[in-house]
Image (tube, rainbow, N blue to C red):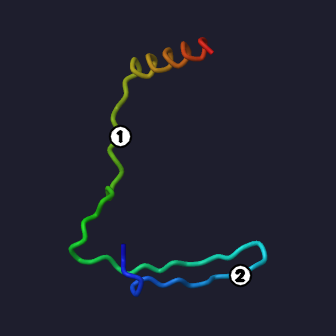
Amino acid sequence: MAPAEDTRVKEIYKRASGQAFEVILATPAPRAKVSFPLFPPKKTDVSLGDSQKKLDAAEERLDLI
């Protein structure tokens, strides 16, 4: 987490129903590791047979209820 001096809080508006703030964070350090993926995972091709098996299993679970 960034030190407090690198973070700013800007009040956007204040009303009786609540307040809104904008939190401005400092830029990350140049050697900081990225802990989340930059690109979404690639979609895998699902065959029609796999989809049908999943659909059948879901229908069986619904019949048990």
> Closer to the camera, 62 or 47?
62
Quarter of the image for the C terminus: give it: top right
Q: Position of residue 35 (x, y in %)?
A: 30, 60
What's under tag 1, amino acid-wise? Lys
Q: Position of residue 59 (x, y in %)?
A: 56, 16
Label placed on residue 12: none
What's under tag 2, amino acid-wise? Lys
SS under mark 1: loop
Q: Residue at x 77, y 72 (%)?
A: 17
Tell me if mark 2 has few (under 14), some (14-19) or many (20+) residues whose alpha carbon lies within 10 angstroms of its own. few
**As displayed, is residue 4 above or below residue 31?**
below
In this view, the mark in front (2 or 1): 2
Q: Quadrant of residue 33?
A: bottom left
| Cα distance between the residues tagged 2 and 1 | 44 Å
Q: Is 14 left, or right, of 1 in this rendering? A: right
**Which residue matches tag 2?**
14
Mark closest to the chain's N terminus, 2 or 1 = 2
> Closer to the camera, 37 or 15?
15
Q: Is 12 left, or right, of 55 in this rendering? A: right
**Which residue matches tag 1?**
43
Q: Residue at x 39, y 20 (%)?
A: 50
